Image (cartoon, helix red, strand yellow):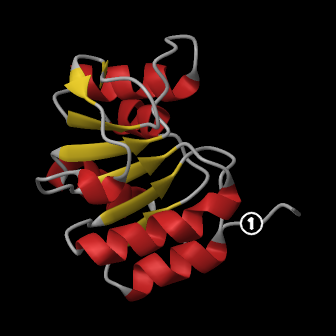
Amino acid sequence: MECEFPAINSNEQEIKEIFDSVKTIAVIGLSPDDSKASHRVAAYLQQQGFKIVPIYPKEDTILGEKVYRSLLEVPFEVDMVDIFRKPKELNNVADDCIKRGDVKVFWAQKEIVNNEAAAKAKEHGMRVVQNKCTMVEHRTLR
């Protein structure tokens, strides 16, 4: 797969508004391994007061939170998805966000870009951030 440049991306002001409004973040690909970026980023966001919802194929709890196997299983509102998956998987994530109907922010982590999925999310009213780390952006804007 060739690299993509983010054709759709929120600007700094929009990212600030995202952090001001989001309360619940589903972290897709949240590893139980504390040496992994997904774990460190989710732990940071949790420490900043965000409700973290782990989406992972194994484990019962991660960071003290119940683990769900898919975004569609989460029985309460999710404001944002923070995605730690390969770019090709983002189309499926966008489809799940659209099916849920409550996700307001579609965020693909550093080095993750899929403009097709981003366009689909944006067309359904979501704000989109690609190729940016939630932890780095939050720290920068604080």
> Where residue 73 sits in the image (x, y, percent)?
26, 53
The vertical placement of 71 against 97, above or below, is: above
Instruction: Residue at 31%, 82% (x, y): give it.
Output: 125
Amino acid on which disc 1 is placed: Phe
Check disc 1: other Cα within 10 Å, few if <14, some if 14-19, many if 20+.
Answer: few
Q: Quadrant of residue 123?
A: bottom left
The N terminus appears in which quarter of the rendering? bottom right
Instruction: Report the front residue among 45 and 90.
Output: 90
> Where residue 7 sits in the image (x, y, percent)?
65, 75
* 39 relative position to 49: left or right: right
* Residue 10 shows up from this direction: no
Toward the right, the furthest residue is: 2
SS of the residue at dot 1?
A: loop
Number of marks in the rendered image: 1
Name the residue tied to disc 1: 5
> Where residue 141 sits in the image (x, y, percent)?
35, 39
Instruction: Residue at 56%, 25% (x, y): give it.
Output: 37
* 48 relative position to 98: left or right: left
The vertical placement of 111 against 92, above or below, is: above
The C terminus appears in which quarter of the rendering? top left
* Residue 96 shows up from this direction: yes
* 4 relative position to 79: left or right: right
The vertical placement of 11 against 43, above or below, is: below
The vertical placement of 104 against 71, above or below, is: below
